Image (cartoon, rainbow, N blue to C red):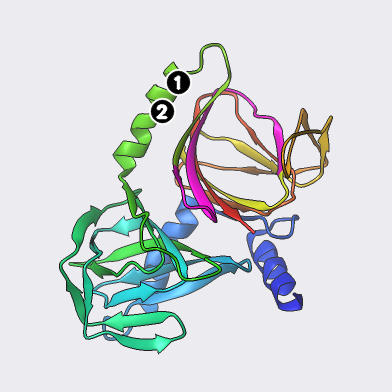
Amino acid sequence: MKLKLTLILAAALASGAAVPGFVHWSAAELQGWNAKLAAKMKDNKPLGTDLAKFGNHWSSITRRTVDGQAEVHETVNDVFICEAGEATLIYGGTVKNPKSTGPGETLGEGIVGGQRVVMRPGDIVHIPANLPHQLLVKKEFLYFVTKVRDRAPADPKGFAYWSNANLQAYGPRLKAQLAGKNVATQQLANWNTHSFMLVFRTSDGEAEVHEKQVDYFWILSGAPQVAVGGKALNPRTTASNEIRGSGIEGATTTSMRPGDLAHIPAAVPHQAQTKSDLLYAVLKVTQ
């Protein structure tokens, strides 16, 4: 527990946040890792760095210039967001010459069979635990990774791929569904321990507190302020472990732009504030 708190505090300090566990990564900061990692890479070996760790989930960024090995994580799900470059992701099939590299971890020379998708900037994939996967890279590929640990080996189902164009296309569709309201949502996937959804807003949202869920916000379009911390005003329980309020008192406010990511810890009040159209993706992780 002491180590977990130390890591959370370190991540918060690194981001300049006043709320422990809140981390904001700007699009420029994330893409800036391409040059930083390139300067340190040797012999074309992939290089990555941990950005923050939060117990059952953690985030990192990695740069590759050559094909990766086949990988299987028995109890860990991967969510990739392409930041720069291009790569072909092979998923499924069987691992060629598999070797155990640690508890629940397998590497191999390649994948026999499987399916392929091409990842470009802004694309997202979800790779469920126990599913073989491999990245093939022609020139360079920079990607943000969030890993979510399951409590036990999982059924290797639940692969999902969303292109940036596909995600952006939800904006007009959700706007058409507003019908006098200021928010419309679209659930895209639910994997029990974590889920993925889109939110479209035209004005400030309510204050929210998810007592057992973490939110990752990824801004697709718009320029919101995200208020985090403080105290929810006029709180009311809307579901088990879920609280809503009319606003927040004493919050820390962060400006976000398209391509920015933010990690909002569980049990912390937060509010998306906007005066114009806003589309963002939310990865929810249950703790």
Q: Position of residue 231 (x, y in %)?
A: 83, 41
**Magenta-drawn segment:** 189-209
Q: Position of residue 154 (x, y in %)?
A: 44, 65
Query: Does residue 205 appear left or right of residue 195 in this picture?
Result: right
How far across and how far down the image is residue 152, in percent? 52, 70
Q: Quadrant of the C terminus?
A: bottom right
- Is 122 inside the magenta-drawn segment? no
Q: Residue at x 26, y 68 (%)?
A: 135
Is any part of residue 113 visible from this angle?
Answer: yes
Which residue sits at x=32%, y=85%? 42
Give x and y (percent) for residue 98.
27, 84
Q: Nearer the viewer, residue 180 or 253?
A: 180
* Left or right of residue 181: residue 115: left
Tell me the SS state at disc 2: helix
The rendered magenta stretch, by its main secondary structure, is classed as: strand
Amino acid identity at mark 2: Gly
Density class for disc 2 (Cα within 10 Å; few <14, some 14-19, many ≥20) is: many
Near mark 1 (Cα within 10 A), the count class, few <14, some 14-19 or many ≥20, is: many
**Residue at image mark 1:** 175
In-front residue for pair 85/156: 156
In this picture, is 152 found above or below 21? below
- The reply to whether discs 2 and 1 touch (Cβ–Cβ < 8 Å) is yes
In the picture of the structure, the residue carrying the numbered disc 2 is 171
Relative to 262, residue 278 above or below? above
Image quarter (top left, top right, bottom left or bottom right) of the N terminus: bottom right
Question: Residue 182 sits in which quadrant?
Answer: top right
